[in-house]
Amino acid sequence: MAARSGHLYRGGFHGGHHKRNSGKDRVSHQKISRREPKVDENSPIIASFRTYQALMDRKNDKYERLVKISRDVTIQSKRAIFHIHRINSGVDKTTVLKEADEKLIAVREKLCQIALELQGEDLYQYIRAISPGLQEYIEAVAFHHYCLGNGLVSLTQVQSDLEFPATEKPSTEDGDCPSHPAVTLYVPPVEYMLGLADFTGELMRLCITSVSSGDMDLPFQLCQFMREVYHGFSSFSYAGSWELSRKMHTLRQSLHKVENACYTLQVRGLEIPKHMLADVFSSADSEDTGRNDIT
Amino acid sequence: MASAPTQETFSNFQQYLTKDQDIREEIRVSVREIEQTAREILTALQGVHQPAGCKDTVSICKRSREMFANIRRQYNELAAKLPAEQYYRFHDHWRFANQRCVFLAAFLVYLESDKLITREEAAELLGVKERREDGFHIDLDDFLMGLLQLANELSRLAVNSVTAGDYSRPTKIANFVAELDAGFRLLNLKNDALRKRFDGLKYDVKKIEEVVYDVTIRGLNPPPAQKPEAQAEEQ
């Protein structure tokens, strides 16, 4: 009999293999393949798959767009956070916080774009795309809110910042939303909590740098506040996600660092000259970092 | 830095978590029922692999189709438990069950009519909506996974048909699965579970081709009804 190729083959060049279902629809005849088999456009199966292809592409393209915007959100939020840390370096606190606020407003423009992209969609279908950016933004907002002296930012507050009213903006500069109807970016409570957990890491950093710069009050305030936050987190009966458990673990480590810093400050603060305090705490801090997303 | 607003944040979230836990537990119960019915349908449909069942496909299909009424009811119950527009929040709970049910529906439709099930038909059989916008639906990826499971099942059926003495079935299956393969090649798949599963499709195709070959070279295949027309269509 005719030799068989080892490849996929359909079609009737070799003896004995002409049988096919030549029923209602025209069947695709495909040559011995080293190249793409010819596809019969009229087959209902192929037609269906063209539809599926279009649906898949649409979803994947949207997902990719969201990932890109989310990356921008992450970067800009991180910059806002770095900026806020400067309040310990002798610069005027009000100015620093105002500039940080402007950065956060710019981030919200990006979040508006995300909200527009998600209009009519199920947010949870794309949550993996936007989650990192969203959490970073919440971290920045919480940090900013705290440094303004307003304590812990509530979910309600965060959510209301992300309710974008309708606009009629003519410009389409990069980063600006074009004119659009009112739209809201819903903040899932879990994302809010994860953002808060990350925010405590920034508090820890703030504590360490404030001690180094000789501030005798802020470290203790931070310690007290972080204890409250930690107490809140540990009251959950079940974490709801492994990511939250992992961040709670990091929070615990951050709290310990802060508590140790306060202890050291308390016990030895009176005997160490201010300019040497920095050395004491920088050596303590460099041992372990616990956070694996330090930049 | 008052304590009360801070604690309120956490107690609110605790409430959210508790509610979340409750919903998920409800969902699990419903999904388990669907999976149970799916198992029963699978057992019924498996009958076609046996010589007796091979000849008795019609009544096996009839019996299985009736069992889908339960599936419809159970999906309705599941859908009722969901808060509106939160399908994908809980998607992982029923992902596998959906794939399985699509496979069973597709298998049934194939046995009845030699055709590939459409999303519309699947939605009807399973008692769900076709599109996300309309309510509880079958995610496209899950639907496609179900089709790949069908290809796998058919490769087994090809083998068993021959054993049972039905020599024409493998050829029909070969053409069907070949078209399915061609369809899947049109998709731009990402490197995910669906892609991995699709990679297995070629082994199903190969297996079926081998069965057809075995049967053909031994002359067991009945002659085709329209051979000259088929040859004229060739390019």
Image (cartoon, coloured by chain):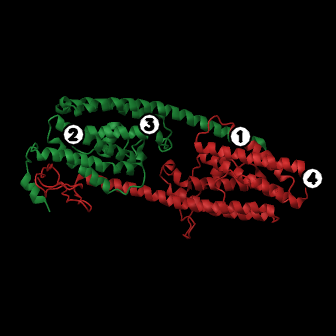
Secondary element under disc 2, as helix, strand or loop, is helix
Q: Are marks 1 and 4 on the same chain?
A: yes
Q: How many neighbours does mark 3 have within 10 angstroms: few (below 14), some (14-19), or many (20 or more)?
A: some
Residue at left offset 56%, top offset 59% = A70
The chain to which mark 2 is attached is B
Q: Are marks 1 and 2 on the same chain?
A: no
- As rendered, which of A61 and B185 lies closer to the eye? B185
Q: Quadrant of residue A13?
A: bottom left
Mark 1 — residue?
A232
| Rendering coords of residue B155 (x, y %) | 25, 42
Disc sitting over residue B79 in the figure: 3
Q: Looking at the image, is mark 1 or mark 4 earlier in the sequence? A: 1
Cα separation between marks 4 and 3: 65 Å
Disc sitting over residue B159 in the figure: 2
Mark nearer the viewer, 3 or 2: 2
Looking at the image, residue A281 lies above or below residue B46: below
Label 2 is placed on what type of residue? Val
Secondary element under disc 1, as helix, strand or loop, is helix
| Rendering coords of residue A164 (x, y %) | 59, 57
Disc sitting over residue A71 in the figure: none
The chain coloured green carries which letter?
A: B
Cα separation between marks 1 and 3: 34 Å
Q: Are marks 4 and 2 on the same chain?
A: no
Mark 4 — residue?
A270
- As rendered, which of B154 and B3 lies closer to the eye? B154
Left or right placement of residue A19 versus residue A133 in this view? left
Q: Colour of chain A?
A: red
